[in-house]
């Protein structure tokens, strides 16, 4: 039986309520807990204990002001920012060069090497935690931001290459040939033409690497023992243990620790979608 356009439209309209229901379920699972944490920071601990799910009455801003006025929060924030910037720069820089070689050069074993990076997505950090810790101790990178940033960059490389390589493959060979005729070297083509044309994908991998590094918990926990070196995820755990009876302040600290990464993700949402769609097409 032949399917006509009106039948397809009716079928889509019949499935639309299911799509709305699925969207509401996703919002309920993801957004509602975040709202509970944010609003809970505007309550007192007595209010939270009396009614765990409730509206602030009255609204209290002392929790947020106390955390913003504490030097420990800003130290945790600075440590996270330094490590995230270093890890992102290393992951994107090395990933862009590897993506360039795997997409524009032809050599024996190219696809096998690309497949090796793909398999790296299946390699969790927890499996490598013990040998990684021993190696970092041997080379003297414990209690050092580089001891966290370099492994984080290494674990971000697979997804970075997986996104950049298909995107770079989609750039026509004629563009490179024209640049060569104009006197551009391979490196000049990479720096002046390929990277600007790959900016959507570069923006995507930059945001993903930054957010992944910002939210990392296990690796900083292995490397750092001194609280002055702690990142925000470790700072949240430390704050919870120190103020275990002050639930409202813990919720406020957790909210403020989420703001930077969430802000970066929201501001770069369109670039992330554009970069991922380009890599899928490739």
Image (cartoon, rainbow, N blue to C red):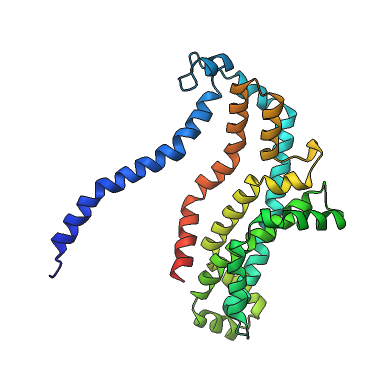
Q: Residue 24: x percent and y percent?
A: 35, 40
Q: Quadrant of residue 130?
A: bottom right
Q: Residue 262: x percent and y percent?
A: 55, 42
18 w.r.t. 49: above or below? below
74 w.r.t. 190: above or below? above
Q: How many marks?
A: 0
157 w.r.t. 193: above or below? above
42 w.r.t. 194: above or below? above
Residue at 60% over, 78% down: 112
Q: Quadrant of residue 156?
A: bottom right
Image quadrant in which the N terminus is located: bottom left
Towards the viewer: 59 or 176: 59
Q: Residue 233: x percent and y percent?
A: 66, 39
Residue 264 located left or right of residue 242: left
Q: Residue 75: x percent and y percent?
A: 74, 36
Towards the viewer: 102 or 201: 102
Residue at 79% over, 43% down: 224
Residue at 48% over, 74% down: 170
Residue at 61% over, 69% down: 117
Residue 175 located left or right of residue 20: right
Q: Quadrant of residue 151?
A: bottom right
């Amino acid at each position: 039986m032949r399917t006509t356009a009106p039948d397809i439209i009716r079928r889509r309209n019949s499935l639309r309520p299911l799509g709305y229901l699925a969207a509401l379920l996703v919002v309920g699972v993801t957004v509602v807990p975040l709202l509970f944490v944010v609003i809970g920071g505007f309550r007192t601990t007595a209010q939270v204990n009396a009614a765990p799910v409730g509206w602030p009455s009255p609204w209290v801003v002392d929790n947020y002001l106390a955390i913003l006025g504490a030097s420990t929060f800003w130290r945790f924030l600075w440590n996270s920012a330094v490590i995230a910037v270093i890890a992102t720069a290393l992951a994107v820089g090395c990933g862009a060069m590897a993506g360039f070689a795997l997409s524009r050069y032809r050599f024996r074993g190219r696809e096998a090497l690309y497949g090796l990076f793909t398999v790296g997505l299946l390699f969790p950090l927890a499996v490598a935690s013990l040998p990684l810790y021993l190696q970092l101790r041997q080379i003297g990178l414990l209690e050092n931001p580089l001891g966290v940033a370099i492994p984080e960059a290494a674990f971000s490389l697979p997804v970075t290459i997986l996104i950049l390589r298909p995107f770079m493959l989609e750039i026509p060979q004629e563009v490179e040939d024209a640049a060569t005729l104009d006197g551009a070297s391979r490196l000049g083509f990479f720096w002046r033409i390929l990277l600007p044309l790959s900016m959507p994908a570069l923006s995507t991998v930059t945001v993903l690497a930054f957010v992944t590094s910002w939210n990392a918990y296990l690796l900083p926990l292995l490397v750092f023992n001194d609280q002055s070196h702690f990142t925000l995820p470790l700072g949240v755990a430390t704050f919870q243990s120190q103020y275990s009876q002050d639930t409202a302040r813990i919720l406020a600290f957790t909210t403020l620790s989420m703001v930077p990464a969430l802000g970066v993700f929201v501001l770069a949402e369109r670039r992330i979608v554009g970069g991922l769609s380009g890599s899928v097409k490739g």
